[in-house]
Amino acid sequence: MNILELIEKRYSTKKYNADKTIPQEKIEALKEILRLSPSSINIQPWKFTFVQNPEIKAKLASVSMHNTEKVNQAPLLVVFSVADDLNAFQKVVENELPQARSDWYKQIKATMPEADLKIWLSKQVYIALGVGLTASIALGLDSTPMEGIESDKYMDILNMTAYKPLFAMAVGYASEDDFNRIEATPKSRRLQESVIETI
């Protein structure tokens, strides 16, 4: 199946088969794919938390607004978090990235207002979400992007201090009676001529 066919097949799953587990090799592949996600100046301001523990997942489900059932049903929840403590993240950059990248980040941090810097870093995490959604369908998995989470409560449950959860992605296998399946609810997108301009 080529990339176009995969994207045509992908949709946001609304109901998961809670009894079907994901092979661990697919989870490990998804971890590595997310690690390899692109970001501006290769800054990588993220943390991806893979939650399979049912008790932790249930706690997160309870603070996931309208996504509670999906989080409980899906065998895997990936939480996408952004560096929130900028001083702590600067040490990460200094210790883990090449000197040129570290110098570039220091220059940006010194000249950009903190609020703008945090917005810029958050945008990089959204790139990784796109990679994760595409990777999931390529691995034969269904997924749901979810901004509907209570970020501060996620932080508490996951014992995070330097990173802040932005959104999550449920991953698993769609239930056969999921009303949002392509067969039941065809994909709805604007016409190509409305969104693509060729010059």
Image (cartoon, rainbow, N blue to C red):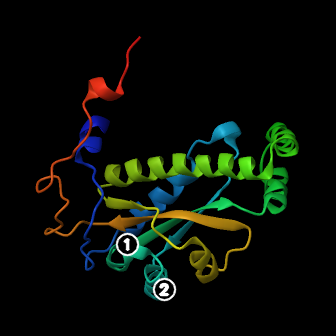
In-front residue for pair 45/149:
149
Relative to 138, is 117 on the left or the right? right
Q: Relative to 72, is 24 above or below?
A: above
Task: Give the image quarter of residue 145.
Answer: bottom left
| Residue projecting furthest to the left | 184
| Residue 44 visible within the image | no
Q: Is residue 3 above or below residue 181?
A: above
Question: Local crowd at mark 2 within 10 Å, few (<14), some, or many (≥20)?
Answer: some
| Residue linked to disc 1 | 67
Taking the image as shown, residue 42 lies to the left or right of residue 20, namely right
Image quarter where the C terminus lies is: top left
Rendered residue at 32%/52% (across/down): 137
Please state the horizontal and vertical placement of residue 136, each as a whole percent of the image. Answer: 37, 55
129 and 20: which is toward the camera: 129
Judging by the rendered image, the residue that carries numbered circle 2 is 59
Q: Which label lies toward us, 2 or 1?
A: 1
In the image, what residue type sits under mark 2? Lys
Q: Is residue 145 left or right of residue 167?
A: left
